[in-house]
Amino acid sequence: MNYKILPAVCLFVFISNLNAQTSPDTTAYQYILDYQVPTSPAFGILGISPQQVVRAGAAKPFVAGVFTDYLKTQKLNPGIAIDFSPYILLGGGLKNIKEYQERPEKRILANTMLSFATIKNSIDSANMDIGLGVRITLFDSHDLFSNNNSAITNSIGTSLANASNAVARRNVIPEDGIGEVTVVPGLKEIYEEAYKKVRDTKGSAASVGFAYKTTAHNSILTKDSLTNNLYKVWLSFSRYNIFPGADLMTIVQGKFGDGLQAEWNMGAALASVNKASNMGAEMVYNFRTKAWDYGANFEIKIARKFSYIVTLGKKSTINGIPVKDFFSINSNFRINFFSN
Amino acid sequence: MPRTCKIDPTGGKITIKLSVTNALISGGDFKIYGFSDGIVTEQYKLQTGNTGTVEKDLVQTAAKLVDQVVSWEVSSCAPLVTNSGIVTIEIYQNGQLCPSLPTANYTLSNVPNCASGTALPLHGGLLFTK
């Protein structure tokens, strides 16, 4: 395979996709929270995805990803990644939507993601690479509920009220009961309209993150068995709708580790999110090696809750060590328990 | 056991309050009807908005409301990352809570996200007594 033409092919497909936007997904977390496992901090530090420019934006409560680098190794060797909002999962709550709007610290807590990922070491499969990460979303102007606008809340409430029908029967005092989840006419349309409106507006989001990677020898988790420690910190800024259908993401990232020189990178990416597919293309500049890396990722929804992701890119370092330029291709099977 | 709410027929206005916690959104239908004839005398569509609470004063006097039933169906969904909460329906007379026995608290879990186009309904009611 001629890898030299891959970036051009990726760029062509990406640009073609920009003009073929479909209506946005109607599932919950596609609207509020635009978060993908390949941009998981834990995934990123393990080098599973060549995607280095991560999206700034609000978080999902729980996302689980299963990864296999089958295309590279012809072995299944599955890895897993779990991303979750600890504030919500540990019982942190919100009084009401007004509190979410008026108290940025609560909003930040609700949108803070912790992530955990493991995969077998690519050199010695007896060893396990482990990644831990945290991503804190500082603000996201496309979060439908974070501004002081009450229109969408009122529309949702009215739609719920109109769909309700209390019984009125003589000689009967209705007893308590909680029913089954039911479809509310017009509710989806309210979201679609709000989401389309916000998608067409410019806006921005920012997040900061930290990730840690280590290798557990013989897959044993003791202090002495953990080596090859690597740390990453980053600041990410996204600009929505930089041109129709595409978001611009930028990142400044520092890498530090055992026996490695400190390294700073700066990157930019264009991303397009659609109903059935997501695409991104990115470029990253390494200030230490003075080299450019680039890559692309494609996510295709193959079934309800399931999607398949292919990432590819040109790299010039491995774990911070400069090497001859090479291309990598990875595949990632993603399961999102919170989408339809 | 059917729920009752004892009101003072000579007292002041009666208010229905719907509230929901944990940043959920609730909206519901409230009907007031005669227990013996089932004829609806008042009906309201209420929704909790950004504050999670809404109140509505009933038009009829307390004396007329005695032996009438308030019936409700309330649907809730989650607009944010939370998916649980408590829906409460309370009755006030002149701003004083009228104890409803048993209290009308509904603990909800696995509330669907509003963007899915679905909601979790609940229902109940009470009889005004003197």
Image: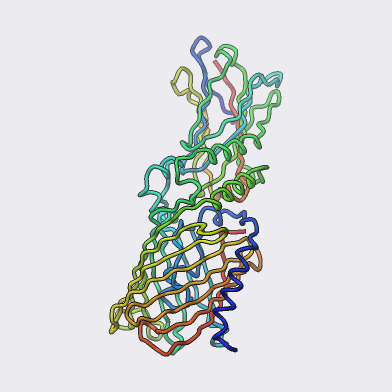
Quarter of the N terminus of chain A within the rendering: bottom right
Quarter of the C terminus of chain A within the rendering: bottom right
Colouring scheme applied when the structure was drawn? rainbow
Picture coordinates of residue B106, whole percent (x, y): 53, 39
Picture coordinates of residue A101, whole percent (x, y): 42, 43
In this view of the protein, which residue sits in the foreground, A171 or A83? A83
Horizontal side, residue A166 vs residue A246: left or right: right
Q: Residue at x 41, y 61 (%)?
A: A237
Tell me if residue A333 can be seen: no
Quadrant of the rendered image containing residue A261: bottom left
Picture coordinates of residue A70, whole percent (x, y): 57, 83
From the viewer's perspective, is residue B95 above or below residue A326? above
In this view of the protein, which residue sits in the foreground, A177 or A5? A5
Q: Residue at x 38, y 82 (%)?
A: A319
From the viewer's perspective, is residue A322 above or below residue A54? below
Q: Residue at x 46, y 86 (%)?
A: A122
In this view of the protein, which residue sits in the foreground, B14 or A44? A44
Q: Residue furthest top?
A: B10
User: How many circles with numbers are drawn on the protein?
Assistant: 0
Picture coordinates of residue A75, whole percent (x, y): 56, 86
Tell me if residue B121 can be seen: yes
